[in-house]
Amino acid sequence: MTRRILIPVDSSPQAMEAVRHASDVHAGDDLVLLHVIEYSESITDPERGGRKQAEGWYAKARAEAEDLFDRLTEAMDHDGEVTTAIADGSPEGEIIDYLSDHDVDQVVIGSHGRTGATRILIGSVSESVARRSRVPVTIVH
């Protein structure tokens, strides 16, 4: 039976490792690459350029996400289906929402390996997803 594996991705080396891991371990399964575009208040604030600036930034962010998908899919040797999705919002929230809205069997996510004060202050998306996910999560270092 084919399983559906969600791989949240950004342009980090850890995301590439997660893609490689999922492609190897889940060779015949369907993979979904999810990229989350995180808005910033400074970009959407009308006092700082308003909607026009936000639209330009967003178009660029979507184009960069599509380029990222192209690079990742070209680098993988995978027998199953590979699809892509783009979401807007906070990474951990959008990943959990995707799990709620779609049939996913497992998450494979890269870890940025934050330690010390940085980890305490801003946390880890992979840890948050692992705590909140309804499906198994593999964190790849």
Image: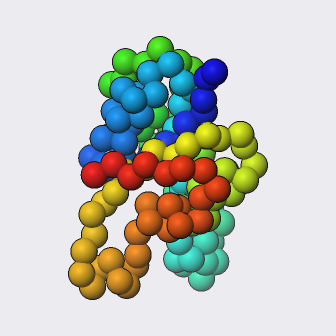
- From where the camera sits, is residue 53 visible? no
Where does residue 136 sit, x and y in percent of width and height? 54, 50
Q: How are the residues colored?
A: rainbow
Q: Total label count?
A: 0
Q: Residue at x 29, y 79 (%)?
A: 118
Between 63 and 112, the one nearer to me in the picture: 112
Between 75 and 128, the one nearer to me in the picture: 128
- Name the quadrant of the N terminus: top right
Seen as rendered, the residue at the extreme top is: 79
Examine the rendered structure and indicate whether residue 71 appears above or below residue 93: above
Seen as rendered, the residue at the extreme left is: 116
Compared across the picture, whether 136 is left or right of 94 comes to: left
Residue 77 falls in image quadrant: top left
Q: Residue at x 43, y 49 (%)?
A: 138
Examine the rendered structure and indicate whether residue 78 appears above or below residue 41: above
Where does residue 37 sit, x and y in percent of width and height? 54, 56
Between 52 and 80, the one nearer to me in the picture: 80
Compared across the picture, whether 33 is left or right of 72 comes to: right
Q: Residue at x 56, y 77 (%)?
A: 41
Where does residue 93 sit, x and y in percent of width and height? 61, 64
Compared across the picture, whether 14 is left or right of 52 comes to: left
Q: Residue at x 50, y 61 (%)?
A: 130
- From where the camera sits, is residue 140 visible? yes
Where does residue 69 sit, x and y in percent of width and height? 46, 34
